[in-house]
Amino acid sequence: MPNADEISEIDGIVDVGEIADLGDNNELDIVGYTLREAKQKLNMMDICIVNVEVISQPRENTTEYNDDYRIIKQEILDEYRIKIYVCKG
């Protein structure tokens, strides 16, 4: 079994080295940003938001959001794509 340093891109797993290159010195951390702020930062880095999941209270099943929602989690999919989770701020 390969160790973490040997894994490059197997079955959708992206090499850790590629992720670290995203923001120069691993600066890609948008948790806590509003969606508006995150869009601006990601646009400057040529990173595309491919999916936005809305996290809400139980029984409040909504998929609607706006630029004032806060990012509570991020998933870096590859060098140019990210999935984010937002909640009402």
Image (cartoon, rainbow, N blue to C red):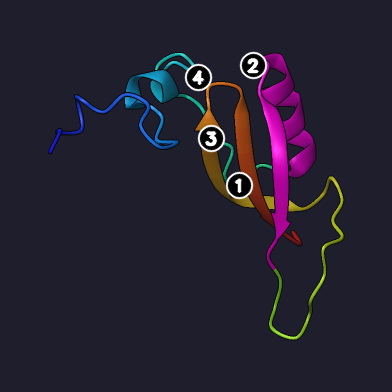
Report which residue position mark 4 lands on.
22
* Three-letter code, disc 3: Leu
Secondary structure at badge 1 equals: loop
* Three-letter code, disc 4: Leu
At a point 60% along the width and 22% down the height, the residue shown is: 80
Distance (Cα) linking label 2 and label 4: 8 Å
Lower position in the chain sequence, tag 2 or tag 4? 4
Q: How far across and how far down the image is residue 58, in percent?
A: 69, 83
Lower position in the chain sequence, tag 4 or tag 3? 4
Distance (Cα) linking label 1 and label 3: 19 Å
Report which residue position mark 2 lands on.
45
Report which residue position mark 1 lands on.
32
Stretch in magenta: 34-55
Lower position in the chain sequence, tag 1 or tag 2? 1
Q: How far across and how far down the image is residue 8, in percent?
A: 32, 24
- Front of the two marks 1 and 3: 3
Left or right, 78 with respect to 25, comes to right
At a point 76% along the width and 25% down the height, the residue shown is: 40
Lower position in the chain sequence, tag 3 or tag 2? 2
Distance (Cα) linking label 1 and label 4: 18 Å
Does 56 appear in magenta?
no
Distance (Cα) linking label 1 and label 2: 18 Å
- Front of the two marks 1 and 2: 2
Secondary structure at badge 4 equals: loop
At a point 57% along the width and 44% down the height, the residue shown is: 31
Q: Residues within 10 Å of mark 3 (few under 14, many from 20)?
A: some
Q: Residues within 10 Å of mark 4 (few under 14, many from 20)?
A: some
Left or right, 64 with respect to 71, comes to right
Report which residue position mark 3 lands on.
77
Is the C-beta separation of discs 2 and 4 under 8 Å?
yes
